[in-house]
Amino acid sequence: MSQDIYPQLKEIIKPYLPEDVNPDAISHESHLVTDLNINSTHLVDIVLDVEDAFDITIEDDELDKMETVKASIALIDQKLSAR
């Protein structure tokens, strides 16, 4: 399932990238804040978009688990498996 999540997640992240970050820089190992320079406001927007796209709910205490693309995929996969 996680192979399907990565391209969708990448498309969700792209609009929130600052102009100086190339969308091709998004990899599984990318840290959303330090590598992709996504600010905290946009992180919340990304979480909301992820919730809508995958029809899941991410609790406030789970936001810390979404530091990297890989960790975000794992959390989404976990949420989808629990349905």
Image (tube, helix red, strand yellow):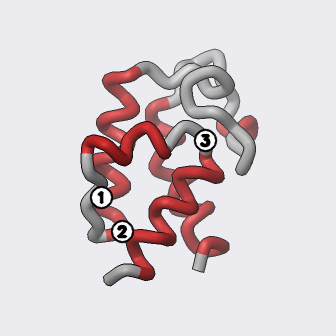
Residue 47 screen position, x and y as percent: 34, 46
Residues at circles 3 and 1 in contact by the CB criterion of under 8 Å:
no
Q: Residues within 10 Å of mark 3 (few under 14, many from 20)?
A: many
Identify the residue shown where x is 37% and y is 80%: 82
Residue 72 screen position, x and y as percent: 52, 52
Residues at circles 2 and 1 in contact by the CB criterion of under 8 Å:
yes
- Which residue is denoted by mark 1 in the rendering? 51
| In the image: residue 70, left or right of residue 8 | right
User: Which of the two labelled residues, at mark 2 and mark 3, occupies the earlier sequence position?
Assistant: 2
- Which residue is denoted by mark 2 in the rendering? 54
| Type of amino acid under label 3 | Thr
Question: For residue 24, what is the image quadrant?
Answer: top right
Q: Residues within 10 Å of mark 1 (few under 14, many from 20)?
A: some
Identify the residue shown where x is 28% and y is 70%: 55
Q: Which mark is residue 68?
A: 3
| Type of amino acid under label 1 | Glu
